[in-house]
Amino acid sequence: MMRLDAPEKQHRYHNLLDDDHANEMLEGEGAGLAVRVAELEVRCARQAEDLLCLRSTLADALRRLNALEGRAPTATSGQRNGAYGGSQGTPTRELRLRQPSYRETAKRTSSYGSSASSLPQRRGVQHQSTGSLQSDSPASSSSLSPAPSPSPRATPAPHHTPHTAQPYRSRNNSTSSNQSVSPGGNNLTKRWNSTGDFNAHGLLPNSRFTTTKSLLNLYSKPSQNGPILKHGTHTCQYNEEDGTMRMYLRGRPVILYGPSDQDNLDPAKVAPPPQQKLKLEWVYGYRGKDCRSNLYLLPTGEIVYFVAAVVILFNVEEQCQRHYTGHTDDVKCLAVHPNKLIIASGQCAGHDRLDARPHVRVWNSVSLATLAVIGAGQMERAVACVTFSRADGGALLACVDEGTDHTISVWEWQRSDKHCIAETKCSVDTVVAAEFHPLDRNQIVTCGKSHIAFWTLDQTNMLYKRMGVFETRDKPKYVTCLGFTQNGDVLSGDSSGNIIVWGRGTNTILKLVRGVHDGSVFSVCCLKEGNIVTGGGKDGRIVMFDADMNATGLENIIEGHYGGVRVIAEGRGSQLFIGTTKNCVLHGDLQLGFSPAVLGHVDELWGLATHPSLPQFVSAGWDRLLQLWDGLSHSTVWSKDIEERAQCCAWGADGSVIAVGCLSGKWMVYDPHSRELLAQHHDGSEPIQTIQFAPNNKLVALGSRDNFIYIYQVDDNCTRYSRLGKCLGHSSYITHLDWSEDSEYIRSNSGDYELLYWNATTCRQITSATQMRDVSWATNTCPITFQTIGVWPENADGTDINTCTRSHDAKLAATGDDFGKVKLYAYPVTQPKSLSHQYGGHSSHVTCVRFLPDDSRLVSTGGLDTSVMQWVVD
C-alpha cells in the first residue's frame, strides 16, 4: 500500500473538497433551475388560460355582433393590457351596429343616434361607416370573421385617439367591412365617410381604395378606375373606360351607364345646389280627423288652423294664405291669446329627438316671428292641449302632455327663462281639452275619458284638482268639449249627446240637457251676444241655444260627405266657420247653409299627377277620393268618390283622360270634364304602384306590386284599352317607370333597387344596358338612374327616396323622402355628392312631387299627413 506524504494528502483533500463543493453547487443550481422551470410552466399555463379567455371573449363579442342590431358599443375602462385593449381608462375600438328602422307601413317616426354597450375590442383609431370595424395600425392588418373561435393577433396595436362615432341611420347590416392601412401607405384599404375626409388627411383624389372581407363574409371587388367613396349606405365608383357608375344600396351593387358623350366624372367633387329655390305658396288640407279646438278667426279676417307641420292663416274672402313653418313635425293643438294676435301651437315628437322634441311655440300672427319655445325636453310624446289664461291678460300658458301620465304644466311664457310654475299628473285617462276660465285667473278645466276636472292654482303655485261629480247613470264615456257662458258657468259636451252646465266655482251639475245630438257633441261655441251653438260629430247637426241653454229652434245640418262637426268658430256677424271630421272647413250661417272653404284628403295620400299643359293637377288617396285642383286659383275644381282606394294616377299625354291605379289591382280611366268613367280593368290582385301614358298617347304602362309591368294599347281617343302583354323580369315590386321620348322603351325601378329596360311593343326586357345609354327619356320619375345618383342622401337606405321628378326644361330635379323633406337639385344629379335646397312642412313621408307644365311651381303630397303643398320655383 502506497503511503502519501502530508503535502500530497493535503492536496488531495483540497481536491476532494473542491469536487464536493462543485457537486453541491451543481445540485443547488439544478434545484434552482427546476424551480424556475416550474415557475415558467405555471406562468405559461396562466398565459394560456388568459389567451383562452381572450379568445372566448372575442368570439362572444363577434357572436353578439352578429346577433344584436341597433347599438353602438363603447369600450370599457378596465380591460386587460395587450392586443385587445389598453390599460384602465384607455379607449378601445367601438362597434357600429344597425339602428332599428322606424317605418314599414306608416313610415315616419324615427330616431338618429346610437346607444352604448361594453364589448372589449381591439384598440385603435377608426373611421365609422355602416357597421364596419377598421384599424389604422401600421403593424398589423387583420380581417375579423364571425367564426366560433377566432385566432386574433397578439401584437398590441399602438395607441391612437379614437375617432368620435357619428350618429347614423341604416337598415342594412350587410355592407360593413374591416379595413386597415398597409405600412407603406401605397395600398390604402380604408373606407371614408365623405369627401371631406380626403382634405382632412391630405390624400389625393387619385389614390386607390379597395375593400376587404366584411364581418358577414361579403366581398366587394377592388377598385380599378379611381377612388371608392363612402357615400351614406352605398359606395360609388366611376369607371372611366366604360363610363359607368357603380353604387350600392343596402349592399346591392347597381351599375348605371352614363351617356356616351358624358365627360369623365370625379366622384370626389361636390355638385352645388341650383340657383332657384322653393317658397311655400299654398297648403291644401286641414287636420280635423283627430284634432280638436283647432280653428279660430283672427281680427285680420284670417282663419287660423293647421295641417301637417304648418299653421295656416287663410283669408277666405281675399283667397290668400300665410304660413307659420316653425314646427318640425305634426301640429296637434292651437290656442289664441286674449289679445287675438299671439298664437300658441303644440307639436308631437318628430324624427330627430333633438330638433323635433314635443314643445309649444308661441308666435306673433302678424309678423310670424317666434316669441317663445315652451317645454322642449320636458314633454314626453306630444302636446295634447294648450290654453292661455284670460282673466289676467294671457300671462300664463297651460299645456297637457300626451304621455302616459298626461302631465299638466303652467308656464310664465313671457319670462326670459320660460319658467314652469306648476306641474302635476293630470289624469290616468286620455285628456282631450283644457281651458283657462275666462273670469277666474287661477281656474283651469280639463276633460277627457270619463272625467271632467276643475283645477285651482293657489298663491304658492300648487295645483289642486276637484273631479266633476256625475250621477251614476249619466256618467259619459268621454267628456269631449268645453265652453263657458257669459256668467262664468262651465259647459261640457259628451259622447252621449248631452250638454251639462256646471255652476261657476263648483264641481256639481247645474243643468243637464239630454239628447242634444245623436252621438258625441264635438264642439260648444259661446257667441258674443250670449247664444250657444253646438255641433254633432256623428249627426252633423248645428244647433243654437240661448244663454240659458234653451233651444231656439234654429239649426242646420252639413252634408254627409263633408263629415261630422269637429269644431265651430264664430265669424263676423252671423257667419260661422265649421271644421269637419273629414278634413274640410266650411263657412256660412245657420239660415243660408254652409259651403266649403277648404277641402282635403282624409286618408293616406299617394297619387299625384299634373296636367300636361294646364296649371292643374289631380290627387288620389286611400280615402277613395279623386280631386282636381287648380294651381293658380288654389281651389278645388271637383272631388269625386271613386269607391276604390287609390295608389297612383296619371294624365293622358293630351290631357283628355285621367287614369287611376288602385290598391285592389283595378285601374280606371275618367273624363276630367264630365267625371264620367270611361274604362276600367283589373290586373292581378296587388296594388297598381305607378301608371304612365306614353308620349304618343297610344300606350299606357302600369307597374304593379306583383312584380309585373302591364302594357295596354290605347284606342278611340283614350276610351278603349287592350292589353298587349306584361313585362316579366323584376324580382320585386315595381316602384317607378319612365317612357322614352319616342314611346318605344320603358325603364323601371323595383323594390330591390333594380333598373331594367323594356321594349314596349314586345314587352321583352332589353338586357344590354349599354344599348340604352343614349336614349332620351320623356320623364325622370325613376330615382335609380345615372342622372339621379346624387339624390341619395347620406345615411339613407334604398327606401328613403319615395319620389323623384325632373322639370320639363331639364334644369331641376326634386325629390320627396321619408323624413318629410322636399329637396331641390340642379339636374342632372350625376355627382354622388350633390348639394340641394331642403324644405320642411310635411310631417309624414313625402309620397309624390311633380312640376306644373310651365315649371313655375312644384306640387308635393304627404302620406299620412294627407296634405298637398304647392311651392313656387323662385
Image (cartoon, rainbow, N blue to C red):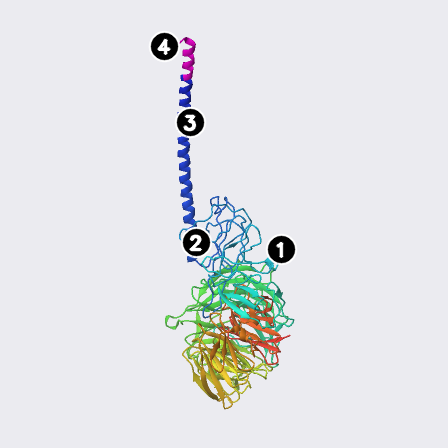
Q: Which is nearer the eye, 443 or 83? A: 83
Label 1 amino acid?
A: Gly
Label 2 amino acid?
A: Leu
Where, by quadrant of the figure, is residue 770 drawn? bottom right
Q: Which is nearer the eye, 344 or 288? A: 288
Q: Is residue 299 magenta?
A: no
Name the residue carrying label 2. 62
Q: Are marks 4 and 1 in contact (CB under 8 Å)?
A: no
Q: Which mark sits nearer the N-terminus, 4 or 2?
A: 4
Q: Which is nearer the eye, 34 or 345? A: 34
Q: Are marks 3 and 4 in contact (CB under 8 Å)?
A: no
Of badges 3 and 2, the one in the foreground is 3
Q: Which mark sits nearer the N-terminus, 3 or 2?
A: 3
The furthest residue to the front: 2
Q: Which mark sits nearer the N-terminus, 1 or 3?
A: 3
Name the residue carrying label 4. 2
Q: Are marks 3 and 2 in contact (CB under 8 Å)?
A: no
Instruction: Please rate how many residues cluster around mark 3, counting C-alpha atoms within 10 Å: few if below 14, some from 14 to 19, many from 20.
Output: few
Give above or below for 313 relative to 148.
Answer: below
Q: Which mark sits nearer the N-terminus, 4 or 1?
A: 4
Residue 641 percent location from the top left of the image: 47, 83
Q: Could you say whether the residue bearing mark 3 is in a helix, strand or loop?
A: helix
Residue 819 percent location from the top left of the image: 53, 68
Of badges 1 and 2, the one in the foreground is 1
Asked whether residue 303 appears in the rendered view, the answer is no
- Span colored in magenta: 4-15
- Residue 187 - label: none
Residue 37 percent location from the top left of the image: 41, 33
